[in-house]
């Protein structure tokens, strides 16, 4: 009989009991609509391994991961080449999480995985809002004739919750029409207080890691220079402590484009710190 001990490939600090957890971490290894560099489907697995290089204590938030009470459910399995079936699998599983009275924390994968999460969560909350960290607007109606695209995810989400319930941070790339959409609905946040309009909402936070500058996050599918520094992003997270966050995800790490492993380490710490404010 084997005696072990054996290595744990779940996230550090997780509660192994689903039923007794408040937040469910869900791996979403899908990158079927990526328009530039694919590979984000490998991120959830690599992030789990990298989490063991973290401390379970956050000095910024003075909390332990164990205080968050989250369960790592592992990665969903998707049918290769079938985007719509993949989105359906995500939506049904996230629905189950909220039906059980819990919150989701998704780990992508590409940004389109956020759409079925929002569809599912919107069935449980009427006053849902999105706080969106990204380099890109993601407000296209379609990309190269395909409606379901990571470059259209926030536009489609706006049809579910209303564009007036979206705030976007770090945006620096997109089509002219998308910037006109942001101006029309005042979605772009420049300072912390711009988020205050969502104070009485149930907030879903979605973080595309390319919101960070390429010097910090080269390992992503669509790197965009001129982004946030890590501590700038953490400043926004600290402000989010004052909001009712009912779900979150962190997406678009493509680990194989940064063979140093630094991008994966950064992504892992982003996830740890965002968990602390939920």
Image (cartoon, rainbow, N blue to C red):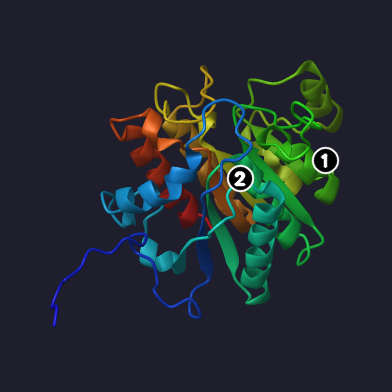
Question: Residue 206 — which label?
Answer: 2
Instruction: Tell me the quarter of the image containing the C terminus.
Output: bottom right
Identified at 76% across, 55% down, the residue is 128
Instruction: Tell me the quarter of the image containing the N terminus.
Output: bottom left
Q: Is residue 177 left or right of residue 138?
A: right
* Residue 193 horizontal/vertical position (percent): 67, 37
Q: Nearer the viewer, residue 80 or 105?
A: 80
Q: Residues within 10 Å of mark 2 (few under 14, many from 20)?
A: many
> Could you say whether the residue bearing mark 2 is in a helix, strand or loop?
strand
Question: Residue 163 — which label?
Answer: 1
| Residue 145 location, quadrant | top right
Q: Residues within 10 Å of mark 1 (few under 14, many from 20)?
A: many
Identified at 61% across, 70% down, the residue is 97
* Residue 136 horizontal/vertical position (percent): 64, 27
* Residue 73 horizontal/vertical position (percent): 47, 66
Q: For marks 2 and 1, give the CA distance.
A: 15 Å
Q: Nearer the viewer, residue 253 or 36?
A: 36
* Residue 224 horizontal/vertical position (percent): 54, 20
Q: Is residue 93 left or right of residue 10?
A: right
Identified at 62% across, 48% down, the residue is 205
| Residue 131 location, quadrant | top right
Is residue 150 visible to us here?
Answer: yes
> Could you say whether the residue bearing mark 1 is in a helix, strand or loop?
helix
Vertical comparison of 191 with 195: above or below: above
Instruction: Please report whichever mark, 2 or 1, sits nearer to the chain's N-terminal start.
Output: 1
Q: Is residue 26 left or right of residue 218?
A: right
Identified at 42% across, 29% down, the residue is 217
Q: Is residue 127 left or right of residue 41?
A: right
């Amino acid at each position: 009989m084997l005696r072990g001990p054996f290595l744990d490939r779940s996230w550090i600090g997780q509660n192994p009991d689903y039923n007794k957890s408040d937040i469910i971490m869900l791996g979403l290894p899908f990158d079927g609509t990526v328009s530039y560099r694919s590979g984000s489907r490998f991120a959830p697995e690599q992030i789990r391994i990298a989490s063991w290089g973290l401390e379970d204590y956050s000095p910024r938030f003075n909390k332990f991961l164990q205080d968050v009470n989250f369960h790592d459910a592992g990665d969903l399995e998707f049918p290769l080449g079938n985007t719509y079936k993949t989105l359906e699998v995500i939506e049904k599983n996230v629905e189950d999480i909220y039906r059980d009275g819990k919150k989701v924390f998704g780990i992508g994968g590409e940004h389109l995985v956020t759409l079925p999460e929002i569809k599912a969560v919107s069935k449980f909350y009427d006053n849902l809002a999105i706080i969106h960290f990204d380099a890109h607007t993601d407000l296209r109606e379609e990309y190269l004739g395909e409606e379901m695209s990571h470059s259209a995810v926030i536009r489609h989400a706006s049809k579910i919750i209303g564009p007036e319930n979206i705030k976007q941070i770090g945006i620096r790339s997109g089509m002219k029409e998308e910037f006109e959409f942001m101006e029309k609905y005042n979605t772009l946040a420049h300072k912390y207080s711009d988020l205050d309009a969502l104070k009485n909402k149930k907030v879903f936070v979605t973080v595309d890691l390319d919101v960070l500058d390429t010097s910090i996050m080269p390992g992503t599918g669509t790197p965009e220079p001129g982004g946030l520094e890590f501590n700038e992003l953490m400043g926004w997270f600290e402000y989010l402590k004052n909001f009712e966050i009912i779900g979150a995800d962190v997406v678009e790490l493509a680990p194989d484009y940064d063979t140093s492993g630094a991008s994966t380490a950064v992504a892992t710490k982003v996830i740890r710190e965002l968990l602390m404010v939920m």
